Amino acid sequence: MIRDIVTIGHPVLREATRRITADELSTPAVQQLIDDLIDTMRNANGAGIAANQIGEPLRITVIEVNDNPRYPYKPRIPLTVVVNPVIEPIDDETVVINEGCLSVPNLRGDVSRNVNVRVRYLDRDGVPHDEIMRGLTAGTFQHECDHLDGTLFVDRVTDTRTLTTWEQFERFHRAAFIERITAFVERVGS
């Protein structure tokens, strides 16, 4: 079921989410929430969505990148259900990514993200994963995990002069960003 996406200013976006127990994860209610997150993300052409973005303060996010018209430069990410994630940088290498967010409609800005991160999480079946993410994929995981801690991308924008609407991004900034980020993706591979 497609759910309403809450937007910046709603208090649930600023709360740290609650971890899910193994017993909770297997309940029909939580499994339905995961399905709703997937449906809502796909309907909005998002690269990911966290449970608190649909008003549920639980530590769950879903991520998927296919042929997304909003992010044609992003490498593919198969549908990934991420429960109770712990994310940590592997090194100090960073990249500046121009990000947007379904909960901050019509706004984009430059955010510095770690290029290499380790993510430990459970999938929807409770199976543990311990993975290394790189490049824009690492950035996507950081963005979604930030949501679970009550942080929005606008909190990480260090130069507010980079804030732009989608229309102005398309008009004035997209070409340069695509050129820079495509070279980055070719260098790091994801």
Image (tube, rainbow, N blue to C red):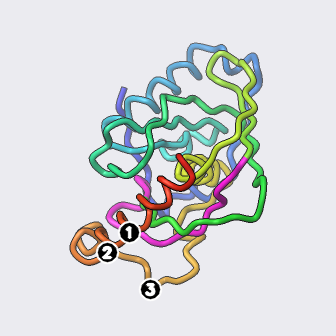
Identity of the residue furthest to the front in this view: 187
Q: In the figure, is residue 45 to the left or right of 170? A: right
Q: Residues within 10 Å of mark 2 (few under 14, many from 20)?
A: some
Q: Residues within 10 Å of mark 3 (few under 14, many from 20)?
A: few
Q: Which residues are magenta?
A: 101-117
User: In this rendering, which labeled residue sits more in front, label 1 or label 3?
Assistant: 1
Contact? badges 1 and 3 (CB < 8 Å): no
Residue 164 visible somewhere in the drawing: yes
Q: CA distance from mark 1 to mark 3?
A: 15 Å
Identify the residue under disc 3: 161
Q: CA distance from mark 3 to mark 2?
A: 12 Å
Identify the residue under disc 2: 173
Q: Determine the image quadrant of residue 61.
A: top right
The three-letter amino acid code for the residue at tag 2 is His
Magenta stretch prevailing secondary structure: strand
Q: In the figure, is residue 47 to the left or right of 169? A: right
Q: Position of residue 19 (x, y in %)?
A: 74, 36
Dot placed on the residue nearer the N-terminal end, 1 or 3? 3
Identify the residue under disc 1: 177
